């Protein structure tokens, strides 16, 4: 099984840090290293629909007004580009599924592409098989930087710890944007992730909880489940040219059979 990745070299190099998974064999450290693929556990038919099912974000009046204004403004695509409307398209009719930028799509949550987790003594890497950034979660005891001197990024700043067999990640410093389920985020918004491995080691349940009293009346939480891929799974390098017009009309539906 093969999955595309623009940072395959990073995955291969990082795997060398972990050797024989000696750290992950400790009782408090779950062996989450490997390749994972997100599952549609509710039969929604698409991850967009799955995200819609997590629509339990309870926003403050101010945040709700700002979210509504953002939707009316047309979203975050570059001028002249139109987002996919999720309606059926005729065979041969191209439609836009991306704005053509070679960046991490969506939020921190995995999409249909595989992602890779690499564990070492001082950090954990989460590498998405998409053009864009990887995540580094520091587990060496450091604190978050002073946000007044931090430039918000797509992945923010993450620190983590192992807690009773669960990997817990704390992230701040994210670029402003949307959150599945109708949520919002700013650089000050705190995201807590809890990665819990099933008893057989084949499934990973990732619980996301967003906290920000300026945005949420109560913490906004939802879960995503991923399935471990076979040991022989490996990534290979792919390319992305943001100037290529095919990046903006990348899907042409084939003729559908009855």
Image (cartoon, rainbow, N blue to C red):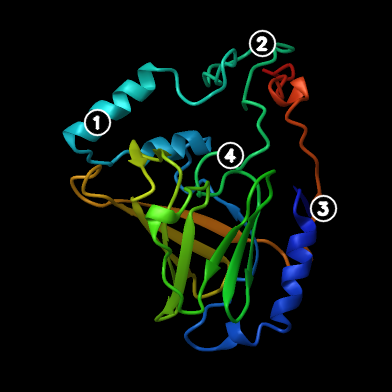
Pointer 3 or 1: first along the chain: 1
Where does label 2 land, which residue?
A: 90
Q: Residue at x 37, y 44 (%)?
A: 186
- Residue 247, quarter of the rendered image: top right
Q: Residues within 10 Å of mark 1 (few under 14, many from 20)?
A: some
> In the depicted view, which residue is nearer to us: 207 or 215?
215
Answer left or right for 62 relative to 89: left
Q: Please give the label number shown on residue 64.
A: 1
Above or below, comparing residue 220 to residue 239 in the picture: below
Q: Please give the label number shown on residue 105.
A: 4
Q: Disc 4 versus disc 1: distance between alpha carbons?
A: 24 Å
Q: Residue at x 67, y 27 (%)?
A: 100
Pointer 3 or 2: first along the chain: 2
Q: Nearer the viewer, mark 1 or mark 2?
A: 1
Above or below, comparing residue 45 to residue 245 in the picture: below
> In the depicted view, which residue is nearer to us: 118 or 47?
118
Pointer 4 or 2: first along the chain: 2
Q: Disc 1 versus disc 2: distance between alpha carbons?
A: 36 Å
Q: Please give the label number shown on residue 236.
A: 3
Answer left or right for 15 relative to 39: right
């Amino acid at each position: 099984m093969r999955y595309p990745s623009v940072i395959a070299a990073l995955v291969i190099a990082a795997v060398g840090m972990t050797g024989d998974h000696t750290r992950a064999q400790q009782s408090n450290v779950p062996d989450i290293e490997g390749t994972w693929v997100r599952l549609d556990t509710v039969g929604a038919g698409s991850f967009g629909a799955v995200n819609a099912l997590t629509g339990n974000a309870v926003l403050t009046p101010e945040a709700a007004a700002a979210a509504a204004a953002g939707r009316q403004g047309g979203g975050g695509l570059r001028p002249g580009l139109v987002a996919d409307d999720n309606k059926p398209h005729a065979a041969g009719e191209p439609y836009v599924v991306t704005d053509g930028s070679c960046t991490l799509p969506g939020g921190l949550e995995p999409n249909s592409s595989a992602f890779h987790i690499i564990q070492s003594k001082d950090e954990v890497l989460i590498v998405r098989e998409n053009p864009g950034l990887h995540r580094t979660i520091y587990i060496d005891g450091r604190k978050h930087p002073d946000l007044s001197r931090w430039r918000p990024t797509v992945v923010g700043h993450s620190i983590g710890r192992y807690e009773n067999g669960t990997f817990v990640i704390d992230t701040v410093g994210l670029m402003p944007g949307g959150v599945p389920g109708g949520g919002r985020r700013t650089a000050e918004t705190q995201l807590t992730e809890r990665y819990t491995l099933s008893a057989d080691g084949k499934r990973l349940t990732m619980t996301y909880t967003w906290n920000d009293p300026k945005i949420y009346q109560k913490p906004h939480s939802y879960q995503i489940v991923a399935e471990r891929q076979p040991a022989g799974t490996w990534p290979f390098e792919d390319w992305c040219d943001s100037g290529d017009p095919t990046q903006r009309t990348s899907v042409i539906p084939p003729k559908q059979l009855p």
